[in-house]
Image (tube, helix red, strand yellow):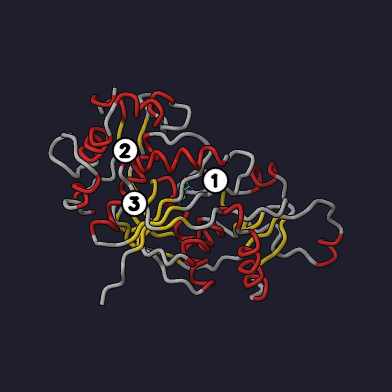
Amino acid sequence: MEKRCVGRFAPTPSGRMHLGNVFAALLSWLSPKSKGGDWILRMEDLDTLRTKAEYSALLRDDLRWLGLHWDAETEPQSARSAVYDRYFAQLREKDLLYPCYCTRSQLHNVNAPHLSDGTYVYAGTCRSLTDKERAAKTRAPSWRVMVPDREFSFFDHVQGLYRENLSTDCGDFVVRRADGVYVYQLAVTVDDGESGVTEVVRGWDLLSSAPRQMYLQELFGFDHPEYAHIPMLMAPEGRRLSKRDQDLDMGALRNRLKPEQLIGVLAHAVGLTETAAPISAEELATVFDWSKIHGKEIVVSELGKLY
Ligand code: GLU
């Protein structure tokens, strides 16, 4: 029997949802709903300085307005550090962790740029420090997990085959920051794994995170989910849409449009429908198919009906 599809939407509540977030929410909802599956909502509020409960409340209200109803909302990440502690301890027991004392400027000077996303490949500077050298350090360390010299590959529903050798393309990566806060890669792996997520749909900018998450899934004993990294929505001047683009946030969009109009425009832009005619999320789920969806960036100024 085929496994029940469980999708999820994992927004960071650091502002009002903008059109790019709506797009990720919609596609992550459509795919499981087209197969009679479940959709889970999770607030990724690890960064407690940027995230606010009022934004989470607005997010839920915006999703309801769009007709994107969730089957469950799991605990927000800010409440789960004791859970993450247990997974961190597993890595420690496997002897896969080491403290890293590198400063930000050392990281940028010593390490080679990462091939795909402009971050760096960690050269392993702190991997082989002796106990004595560690004891002599005065700053609090972050913690890195050692990665294997092995390729991780998967077939993405939108981007096709993606592969990365974690050792040469990424290097040992941080799982807990020096201030004790767990990083996204660890939290997302634990949360998706514990909620039984079978399909991860999110923006293309997170494509290169998938191999790190697949590695952690392996270490924690979770199955790999399927992946779909969807095209980014771009502002006219070629930058990614962000929370700064207030004329395209949900506050402004809800004043101008009905949910079916907004969904119709997005569905057409990504290749799901022949025209941009208004359509509800429910109706769209009946024609949803990953094979119709293209991976090209979408420039919002070309989506005329939004203004
Ligand atoms: N919290 C991330 C964001 O809002 C999404 C992470 C994910 O879907 O894995 O961009």
Q: Earlier in the sequence, mark 1 or mark 3?
A: 3
Secondary structure of the residue carrying tag 2 is: loop
Q: Earlier in the sequence, mark 1 or mark 2?
A: 1
Q: Is residue 151 left or right of residue 94?
A: left
Residue 45 position in % (x across, y down): 56, 47
Residue 17 against residue 205 in the figure, above or below: above
Taking depth in this image into account, of 284 and 27 the one nearest to the observer is 284
According to the image, label 3 marks what residue?
A: 28
Q: Is residue 272 left or right of residue 46?
A: left
Counting other residues with Cα less than 10 Å from the Cα at mark 3, is it few (<14), some (14-19), or many (20 or more)? many
Q: Mark 3 near ligand 1 (CB under 8 Å)? A: yes
Secondary structure of the residue carrying tag 1 is: loop
According to the image, label 2 marks what residue?
A: 297
According to the image, label 1 marks what residue?
A: 119
Instruction: Report the residue at 51% width, 48% height from top.
Output: 114
Quadrant for the N terminus, please: bottom left
Mark 1 vs mark 2, foreground winner is 2
Secondary structure of the residue carrying tag 3 is: helix
Q: Amino acid at mark 2?
A: Glu
Residue 105 position in % (x across, y down): 69, 41
Q: Which mark is residue 143?
A: none
